[in-house]
Structures are given as structure tokens and as C-alpha cells.
Image: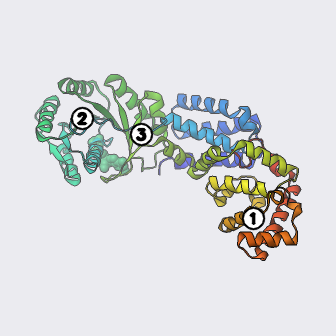
Amino acid sequence: MAFESLTDKLQNVFKNLRSKGKLTEDDVKAALKEVKMALLEADVNFKVVKQFTKTVQEKAIGQDVMNGLNPGQMVIKIVHDELVNLMGESTTELPLKPSNDLTVIMMIGLQGSGKTTTVSKLAGQMKQKGRKPLLAALDVYRPGAIEQLQINGDKVGVEVFSMGNQVKPADIARAAYDHAKSTGANVLFLDTAGRLQIDESMMEELVAIRETIKVDVSLLVVDAMTGQEAVNVARTFNEKVGIDGVVLTKMDGDTRGGAALSIRAICGKPIMYVGMGEKMSDLEQFYPDRMASRILGMGDVLSLIEKAQANIDEEKARELEQRVRKAQFTYDDYLNSMDQMRNMGGISSILSMMPGLGGKMKELEGMIDEKDLARKEAIIKSMTPKERANPDLMSMSRKQRIAKGAGVDIVEVNRFIKSFEQTRKMMKQMPGLMKKGKRGKFGG
Ligand code: GDP
């Protein structure tokens, strides 16, 4: 699978980072040096790597990050966000005209890059989306190219327009355009000829096609397995012919991944699709954020960090932290933290993203079991405001009243209050636990 080695290396770097509570500038710099090496080994363009590590370092050595509860996590998040930036902030859709108009898409690329396969996959997808595609065979040089397109067209149920291999590609393009218009097709795919290497006559031919009919989108197909060569091809095609987007094929192979990370930064054009196999269904829309998470091998943690950032009320968390530190944790605080945990998708998911707390959090797990959260909430809500704010007020008669109010057995109230008191005690014994950061209890 693509990126395997890069992912392994990055995960090692981050494991080290996460195992540290506080980070020094030197820790961050050392980690980024390793990130740099890993990216270079993954065949990411040198200039891209240099800029990337510079940006990450500037952001990571900021005050907010270094003083946060989880500096390691924050650094990982910065790396993730910069990876996304590198590949494009959002996914780029193929720009199609409305269905009552004809969109012309010219597929270009070197021989063997996967052009004929990809154009058929795309036509199939268009058909599934309710469009009426037409495939045109313009590769008049490669033996078997027209037949291959015909076979693929049959597989996806899309008509293939061909005039054999004795007509000039630009003339075939004109005739295919007319045919599309007369048959009501609304997406015309031109499967142009590739060469083994970039050469002038190939460029001229592409330009000639564009002078003959109006091409709306030029999509370049490059083979991810060729690494930096794919990046060079993209840059040259963009300079000489002009492209609107890239399809990166063979991402199912064990490519080191450098092309995916460099193409946009080097040629300024987005990757729109990735080829994930030889079958007609193996073409995926390209999502920079998902790709970044995949490269880091840690999609879940990242979305949790995001959730935490979006949902934690910093002010409340700070107050809570203060009171916990002074061992003034009350039932109101318990309710508050319950709400915050719920906002973040439950306790078990949070526990898993709390590095450094590990074993200690496990001890608390019994008390904050998700299953009886609702009953605990009912118990607290049956307390008077005074009782909630002052746990020491609790007496036998109060407990009986609370049990009645919450509709639970007195045994349950006793058990809950006992475990609450134990937790308070535990908090007193763990002064270091909450001191780690200023940003929020759950490491925002
Ligand atoms: P063209 O010369 O650019 O038209 O390239 P082809 O479409 O003939 O593809 C060349 C080879 O790559 C064929 O054997 C395809 O099956 C294979 N291929 C194309 N795309 C992919 C992909 O995404 N993954 C894999 N594994 N193979 C692919």
C-alpha cells in the first residue's frame, strides 16, 4: 500500500513526541528533522520538504503549543494540517457544465501512465451519476489502444467513438465533438496518445486538438510509482500545454507517496482522482484531508482532537481545573464534565486520546462508565443546589431523599457518592495531573 514506510516512520517520530509531557524547542526540532528525513525518503520533492518543515516548525514552536496540555498531539495536528495544505485545502471536483451542455475533457499523459484505463473509469462514473458520456479514441499510434478503449467502454457501458488509426487526432476530435452533439452526449472524453517520454510532437498534437475544438478540462494522468518523475511530467505538461488537474494512478501499489505530496506544491494544479487498481471501479475522488490522515495513520486521533477543540468550553475547563487543584471538585463540576465529555462523543473515545494519563485514567474509568451516566446524572439532579456545590453536606436522610427523587435504589446513591469521594481523594493525590496545561481539561 502507498505510504506504508512513510507512515511507519512518522508514527515512530510521533510516538516519541507523545510520550513526553512537556516539549522543549529541541524536542520539536529533533522530531521535525526526522519528519524531514522520512519525507525525503518517501521521494517528496526537496523544495517542498524544506518549506514544509519550516512552516511546521514555526507553528509548533509557538507559545500556545508548547504550553498546551498535549504539545505532542498539537505538533501532530500541525503536521497533519500542513500535509492537507500541501495537497490542497479541499477536494477539487471535475468542473462539469450543466447536463444540457457538452463538457469536453481531454485526457493526457505518458504512455503506460494509465490514461486509457482512467478515462474509461471516469466515463463509467459519469454514467453512474446520470450523465451521458462519450469516449473518443484519439490514440492512433499505440497498437491496440483503440481496441483497449473499446473493451473498457463495453465494460462500463459507454459508447466509444473511433475512426481507426489513419485520421489525424485533431480531426477525430472534431468529428467526435459533432457526434456527441448530435447524439445528446454531455461529457466527451478524448483519449489522446501518449509517448514514452515528453516530446515536442506530442505537445503540438495536444495544442492542435485544442485549436480545433473547445476543450473545457485538460486532465493529466501520471503514474504514482514513478515518484519525482511524475512530478516533473506534471510540471512540464502544465508549462507547455496547460492542465487543470491531475489523476494519480497506481496508488494501490507500494509507491513511496512522494508524487501525491509534491505535485500540487510544484505545479500548482490539484490532484482530482487517484487510481486504486486495474478494475473499472478502482478510481476514487481525491480528498487531501483523508490522504493526510492516512499518511499519518491516525485519522481517529485527529478527529478527536478536532472535536475537543470545537467542543470544550475553555472558560469552564479552566475553572474546573482550578477547583480540582484545590480539591474543591463538586457535583456541579461532575455534571459539567459529563456534558463536555458527551459533546466529545463519549468517555471511551476520550480516554483513548489522553496520552500520559494512561493507567491513571483507567482507575477513573469505573466511575465514569458511559452506561450508567444517565442514572448518575439523575442522582446529581435530585440534589439541592447546596448539596451539589458542597459534597460534604451529604447525610443519610439527604441520600434517601435523593434516591427517591432520582428513582433509584439507595444502594446506588451510596455507591455513586462513595466513588465520587474516592475520585476527589484521588485528585488530591495527583496534583501533577491537572497542572500539565492551561488550555483545557481534555487537551484542546
Ligand atoms: P496508457 O498507456 O496511459 O493508456 O495506460 P493504460 O491505461 O493502458 O494502463 C497501463 C497499465 O497500468 C495497465 O496494465 C493498467 O491496467 C494499469 N493501471 C492503470 N491504472 C492503474 C491503477 O490505478 N492501479 C493499478 N494497479 N494499475 C493500473
Residue 272: quarter of image: top left
Residue 287: quarter of image: top left
Residue 375, compared with residue 52, is above or below; it is below
Dot 3 corresponds to which residue? 226
Q: Is residue 249 left or right of residue 188?
A: right
| Mark closer to the observer (3, 2) | 2
Residue at 38% x, 31% y: name it.
Answer: 233
Q: Quadrant of the C terminus?
A: top right
Disc nearer the start of the sequence (1/3): 3
**Identity, as a three-letter code, of the amino acid under mark 3:** Thr
| Mark closer to the observer (1, 3) | 1
Nearer to the camera, 34 or 52: 52
Q: Is residue 15 left or right of residue 285?
A: right
Dot 2 corresponds to which residue? 103
Residue at 70% x, 53% y: name it.
Answer: 354
**Mark 3 and mark 2: Cα distance apart in space:** 30 Å
Q: Secondary structure at mark 3?
A: helix
Residue at 42% x, 50% y: name it.
Answer: 252
What colour scheme does the image use? rainbow
Dot 1 corresponds to which residue? 382
User: How packed is label 1: few (under 14 Cα within 10 Å), some, or many (20 or more)?
Assistant: some
Disc nearer the start of the sequence (1/2): 2
**Mark 1 and mark 3: Cα distance apart in space:** 67 Å
| Mark closer to the observer (1, 2) | 1
Nearer to the camera, 398 or 87: 398
